[in-house]
Image: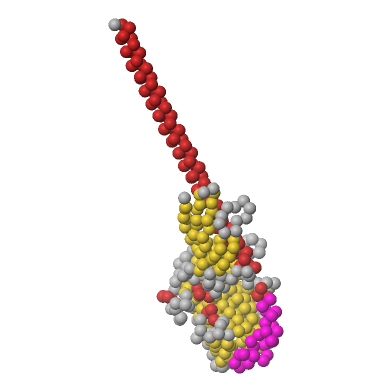
Amino acid sequence: MNIAKRKRESGIVLMAVLLIIFALAVLAATISVMAVTDIKMTVHFKRATEALYEADAAVQYVKAAIQKDLRSGSLALAGTKENVNYTAPNGMFFDPVTELVPTADTNAYFFTVTGYSDKARVTIETVFRRGSTFDLGLFGDSQLDTKAYGNVYTYDSRLVSNPQPEDSLGGGQIASNGDFLSHQDTFIDGSIQLGEDTMGNDGEWSEMPEGGSIITGEPAVQTDRIDPDPLGAIGGDLANDFAYYAVTTNNNNSSANPTITNPKKVWIKNAETMTLTSGNYYIHDLILFNGATLNIDSSSGPINIYITGQMEAKEGSMINISGEPPDLNIFSNSDEKVILKNGGDFKGLVYAPYASIQILNSADFYGIAWGGDVEIKNSGDVYIDIALMQTYLSNVVQLLTWKERREE
């Protein structure tokens, strides 16, 4: 009996051992499968992350390539689809970018770029826009001075033709590399940037009296030095334009009504009118006497006036009053003053980076004023035009949005 009992007990132990071995084998197999799965998931995650990094790096690479092509003139971005061929350089892994497609938004485009690592692929859809040469509606390199009751508003001439203060959109930007002076009851519907002078000294804001100004945005944002001559009136692209249009056969002086026969002195006498049609005009001194009108006919394109001396619009004179700011551009490479006197109206760009621009008492200015210094006298109203700002596009690309799309 004892022998039989021992045999039965031995059989039970053997079965228990076999069951334990089987359970351990199943556990080991499960752990192995889990380990393999974890490794695969880790590898997949790693590859997906690498693909994302490749796609993100590709966005920056394509952005730099777009800027390079804009500077060289091989890329226009003129509102239609652009065919391009941006391929991955050595060490980067992304599919070629072959087109830049315009969006419904003004000046905006999008492209897609797909980065990959092994079988993992990540696509980023990117919307970008060319930046504006003029992010500032008013700029005085050495000084910006707004006298008592001077007002600065912002509007869009594509939406509103003759704005009132209540039409102001806010968010306007004005700046100086030197001093910003605001006086009693100055109103600025926007923000103020203070750059640096040539010695690296920060610009400063002085309020007279203290607390007497209303500024709806940031009152004194410190920034790097602002380029006082981004168009290159001296030694740049604009200087080349001055040289070109100085030649009589290259300018449109003869198309003026009355004809400009002596560009050294263009005088529009009291209550008289001169009309300029689309084209480029080269003038030394431009003087509008009391009540005179410079009429702008931009039906075939904008009017550009290149001034090498002074410009003065006397009391009650009107410049481009029936048009819109993008219709007229006045460029000066001189250090002689640009003066818009009492009660006059002006619509357009005044670009005089080495001169003083003065907008005198009760004058209304619509557009952009960019000067060596800018002064808005008592009760002068300035309406910064967003449409004009977007007319002058830089070769700097701004990324607006991007959206990630992963592919297994």
Q: Which residues fall within the magenta stretch?
A: 240-263
Residue 247 x/y as whole percent: 70, 84
Q: Residue at x 67, y 88 (%)?
A: 263
Q: Nearer the viewer, residue 81 or 201?
A: 81
Q: Which coloring applies here?
A: secondary structure
Residue 213 x/y as whole percent: 48, 69
State whether residue 249 is above or below residue 115.
below
Residue 39 x/y as whole percent: 48, 39
Q: Residue at x 45, y 67 (%)?
A: 216
Q: Quadrant of residue 300?
A: bottom right
Residue 368 makes an appearance in the image: yes
Magenta stretch: residue 218 in it? no
Magenta stretch: residue 257 in it? yes
Q: Is residue 406 left or right of 74 when viewed as pictured? A: left
Q: Nearer the viewer, residue 118 or 333?
A: 118
Q: Nearer the viewer, residue 402 or 327?
A: 402
Q: Residue at x 56, y 82 (%)?
A: 301
Q: Is residue 73 left or right of 28 when viewed as pictured? A: right
State whether residue 88 is above or below residue 23.
below
Q: Is residue 254 left or right of 146 when viewed as pictured? A: right
Q: Residue at x 41, y 32 (%)?
A: 30
Location of the N terminus (image quadrant)? top left
Residue 138 makes an appearance in the image: no
Residue 54 x/y as whole percent: 55, 52
